[in-house]
Image (tube, coloured by chain):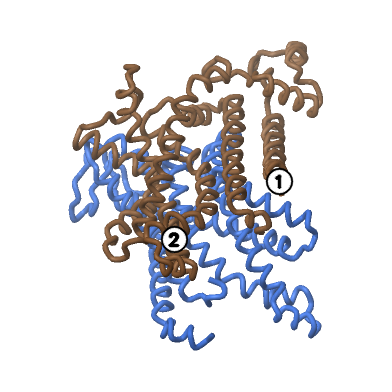
Amino acid sequence: MTFFKLVLLRLLPTLLFLWFFSLLLFALFVWLPGDVAEATFGTQGDAQALQRMRTALALDKTFVQRYLAWLADLAKGDWGESALYGVPVRTLVVERLPLSLTLSLASYLLATAGGISVGILLAARRRTTVLLDLALNILLALPSFLLGIVLILLFAVRWPLLPSGGIAEQAAWSAQARHILLPVLALALPQVAILARFAHASLTETLSRPFVATARAKGISPQGVLLRHVLPTIAAPLLALSGLQAAFLVSGTVVVEHVFALPGLGSLFLNATHARDLPLALALALLFATATLLATTFAETLATTIDARRVDKN
Amino acid sequence: MPYTLALHNASPFPHRRRARYTLGFVLFALSVFFYCAVLTPPPAIVIDDRFLPPSLAHWLGTDHYGRDTLRMILRGGWVSLATALAAVALALLCALPLGFASARTNNSLLRTLSKNASDLLFAFPALLTALLVATLYRPGWLAVLCAITLFNIPVFWKITRAIARSLYLSPFTTAARALGASEGHILLKHMLANTLAPLLTHAATQVSLAILAEASFAYLGLGSPPPHASWGSIVREAQNFLVFSATPLIATACFMVASVVVFSTLAKAYARTLPSRLG
């Protein structure tokens, strides 16, 4: 199977799903009672004025025509106008994207590095890891908002080392980093626990397999066995799992941005929901869904290129 | 093979007993929550008694309206656990037919479709569903229930499909078919009976995840509005009064973490009672 064919095989269902999702979103949007014309005129619109506005906004076209026009607008970069902020959705997204992207990428890297290291540590030393195991169990049982509150109470209130939320007013790199450190930890630690559990389980399972004993018998050092034989074996499933973390990352970003009062995309979505700002919410939903599913698909494709057996795994 | 199993695990009964005790505890806690939430009136608002420390009259003190914290938490427990349990049960009901159907079919297109659909649904963030339902309809238990159910459907779908596929290809199903058993009989007596135990075991794990998800959604204000506070909404409110009294927040957090731990213990205990070929 060529790489191109593989990408197509993975990408096609994702794109189909996203298209279906956009159709569903638009259908719900259109079929909700009331439209922009009614909302604008309130109780004061006569039938003629309503009709004029509907014609002007192309609300009287058929569903298919409106859907296609909406898709074309999305593709052109016109994502509608936010009812809550009164500015184009695109402006809002472009303004807030860097913060959310930094937050999720930093915590993704931290979670992957931390998770795999802790997993190796757990698998390597069997007895001295009771405390680490307990910490992982607590992290798994702690919702991320609670972890955020605990981190604020510890490192911003009890020992005032770091700011409790918001973004830095200074543009200095260090000030920005200080503000984003606690949110990144709150987002990454639960994923560290999940990845560490998985890495530990698959490492222990792989270490008991005969090829490891053979490698040891040939005189390869334990570190060498781990690096050259065991880690490549578990790389593909780990990669696929870390791709699935994208979904957690999206949910986590919303929660963490709310807890730490960060003006990112997650808190924007939450504001849109509470204000029932439909154009903003729909655009953000599409954006989040596309980002998540493409990230997952990308990770799965990479995992398949590493381990070709994943193709026919059903 | 049975001998090696017997040597490995001398008696399966301690696990079974542990599983039963945990289940008993869960049922007891649920009935306490139910009693406090449904059968007794809500705790009275006494503004003069705001932020009382723990005492004999109020075991966990009082909150910002002077309500008894313990009773608020027990009432919230019913909302949280009932939502989590209902969502998982609903997902199980939706996923069973989907799983059986996709295990049964030999049509390669349908099989690919079912695999891709469950994979993609699984990768879809649950919070996104909750936010969308809350935007398009309104925030409330329905948004939370939809989100958690939708998140759990692909989980059970995948498990059901994997187990049912191996069962469909197993000799005893073929034997039953050869003896003239109807499809319905095979489905109920062989498939369902053998799928349910591992599925329910996994459901306990999913309930613990669902409790976490419900708490997060309620914390973000997507859950039921204030009079029907779940644990997440209690934390949401208590956070604002942290300076006056930290007890409500800490106590609620402890209940939340404990319930997650109890359900994952339940899952682990039942997983050990499963035959190894299904576990």
Residue A121: x %, y % from top left: 34, 56
At 69% from the left edge and 46% from the top edge, which residue is drawn? Answer: A6
Name the N-terminal-most of marks 2 and 1: 1
At 75% from the left edge and 20% from the top edge, which residue is drawn? Answer: A59
The chain coloured blue in the image: B
The chain coloured brown in the image: A
* Residue B97 picture quarter: bottom right
Residue A176: x %, y % from top left: 34, 24
Q: Name the residue carrying label 2.
A: A203
For residue A230, above or below residue B197:
above
Q: Is residue A147 left or right of residue B176?
A: left
* Residue B34 picture quarter: bottom left
* Residue B242 picture quarter: top left
Judging depth in this view, the residue of B129 and A230 nearest the camera is: A230
User: Under tag 1, what secondary structure?
Assistant: loop
Tell me the chain of label 1.
Answer: A
Q: Amino acid at mark 2?
A: Leu
Q: Is residue A92 left or right of residue A78?
A: left
For residue B217, above or below residue A94:
below
Judging depth in this view, the residue of A100 and B38 nearest the camera is: A100
User: Under tag 2, what secondary structure?
Assistant: helix
For residue A298, above or below residue B260:
above
At 44% from the left edge and 69% from the top edge, which residue is drawn? Answer: A213
Residue A55: x %, y % from top left: 78, 14
Quadrant for the N terminus of chain B in the image: bottom right
Q: Amino acid at mark 1?
A: Thr
Tell me the chain of label 2.
Answer: A
Q: Name the residue carrying label 1.
A: A2
Judging depth in this view, the residue of B108 and B247 nearest the camera is: B108
